[in-house]
Amino acid sequence: MGENLEEIGIAIVIFIGFLVLRKLFTSIILKSAQIFVKKSKTQIDDKILEVLTEPLKFSFIIIGVYLSITFLNHSSLFADMLLKSLIIFVIFWILFDMVIVFNYSISNFTKKFGSELHKEIASFLSKTIKIFIVLVGFVAILQVWGINVSAFIASLGLGGLAFALAAKDTASNLFGGLTILADKALKMGDWIKVGNVEGVVEDIGLRTTKVRTFEKSLITLPNQILANQPVENFSRRGIRRIKFRVGLTYETPSSSIQKIVEDIKIMLQSHSDIAQDATMLVRFDKFEDSSLSIFIYTFTSTSNWSKYLEIKEDVNLKVIKIVENYNSSFAFPSQTIYLQKGSTDV
C-alpha cells in the first residue's frame, strides 16, 4: 500500500513538473518568439505563432499525463493509444487553425472565379476544408483505437441507408449553396427578398444562408430553398422607380393642366438625380371620380433606399410648387348630392 502511494505521489510530481515547464515555456520562449516575429514586416509569422501557441502549451499536459500514467502502469497499451490519440488531436488542431492563417491566400485564389463573389467562395471553401480536416482527424483517432472505419460503415447495413436518407436534406443544402455561388444570385451584403423573408445577407454557409431582417432579427434559410425559389435581389438594381399620380380638381382649366404636365416633365428631365436614360412618362390620362389624374413614372439614379426617399421627397415638393404656380389645387375624394323636391299626392 505504501509503495502504491509513493508511486502515485511521484506520478503527481511528474505531472506538476510538466505544468511548471509549460509555465516557463510560455513566459520565456513564447514571449521571446512574440517579440521576434513582431519585428518582421509580414503578418503571417505572427498568425502562425498565434496558432501554434495553445497546441504547444497543451503538448506539455499530454506529455505529463503520458509519463505519469506510464510510471504507474509501467508498460500500458492504453497509455500508448491515449498518447497517439492526443498527438493526432494536436496535429489536426494546428491544421484546423492554419486554415484561418491562409484565409488571405484562399481569398486570392478564389478571385480567379470572379471578383464579385470571391469572399463568399473563399468562406465556402474555408469551411469545407475545416470539415474535411475534422473528419480525417476523427477517422485517424478511430484507427488508433483499432476501429476499422471502412468495415464499420459497411456493417451499418440498413442503418447506413437510414443515415443516407437523413443526410439527403444536408446534401441538398450543400449543392444548393454551390448553385447559389455558381449562379452569382447573391452575395454577402445584398438586400434580398425570398417569399416573406426580406433583409440583408450576412453569411452564405455550407447548409444555410443567414439573412438579417430590417427588424434586426436573424433568419436562417436552408440553401435548397434559396436555390429553388425566386430570389428578388434589390441590391442588383442600379436605379429605382418612382410611380405615382397627381389628382387635380375639376375646376382646373385644360390649358393649366397642359402646362403643369409640361413643367413636371421639364423638371424631371433637368433633375440631376433622375435617370435620364430610363423610361420617363408624364401624362394626363384619367378622369377620376373626384379628380383629373396625371400619371408620373420615372426612375432615380440610385437604388439606395435613403437617397431614393430624399429624391422622391424633392420631386414631390417640386410637383406641389408647379401645381401652385398655376393656381390649381389637389383634389380629394368627395361627393356632390343633388336633392330634388318632388310633388306628393294628398
Image: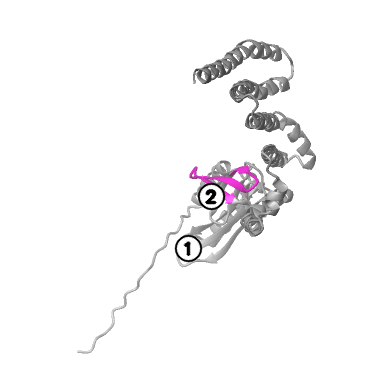
Task: Check the image and report above or below for 138 versus 172.
Answer: above
The image position of residue 252, as x and y in percent, is 49, 60
Residue at x 31% of width, y 77% of height: 340
The earlier-in-sequence mark between 1 and 2 is 1
Task: Specify the amino acid type for callout 1.
Answer: Ser
Instruction: Give the residue furthest to the bottom.
Output: 346
- Residue sitting at x 73%, y 35%: 107
By secondary structure, the bulk of the magenta-drawn segment is best described as strand
Quadrant of the image occupied by residue 285: bottom right
The spot of residue 221 in percent (x, y) is 58, 51
Residue drawn at (73%, 51%) of the image: 183
Instruction: Return the mark for residue 162.
Output: none
Q: Which portion, as a residue range, is magenta?
A: 201-221
Q: Give the answer, above or below, for where 92 lies relative to 64.
A: below
Q: Secondary structure at mark 1?
A: loop
Please tell me which residue lies in front, 202 or 271.
202
In the drawing, does residue 315 fall left or right of residue 227?
left
Query: Is 149 rendered above or below residue 26?
Result: below
Can I make out residue 280 in this image? Answer: no
Q: Quadrant of residue 158?
A: bottom right
* Dots 1, 2 in contact, CB < 8 A: no
The 10 Å Cα crowd at callout 1, few under 14, some 14 to 19, many 20 or more, is many
User: Does the magenta-highlighted stretch encompass residue 217?
Assistant: yes
At mark 2, the secondary structure is: helix
Q: Nearer the viewer, residue 189 or 4?
A: 4
The residue that label 1 is drawn on is 291
* Front position in the image: 17 or 316: 17
Q: On the image, numbered disc 2 is attached to which residue?
A: 319
Give the position of the C terminus as an image quadrant. bottom left
Is residue 158 in view from this perspective?
yes
Figure check: 83 above or below 188 = above
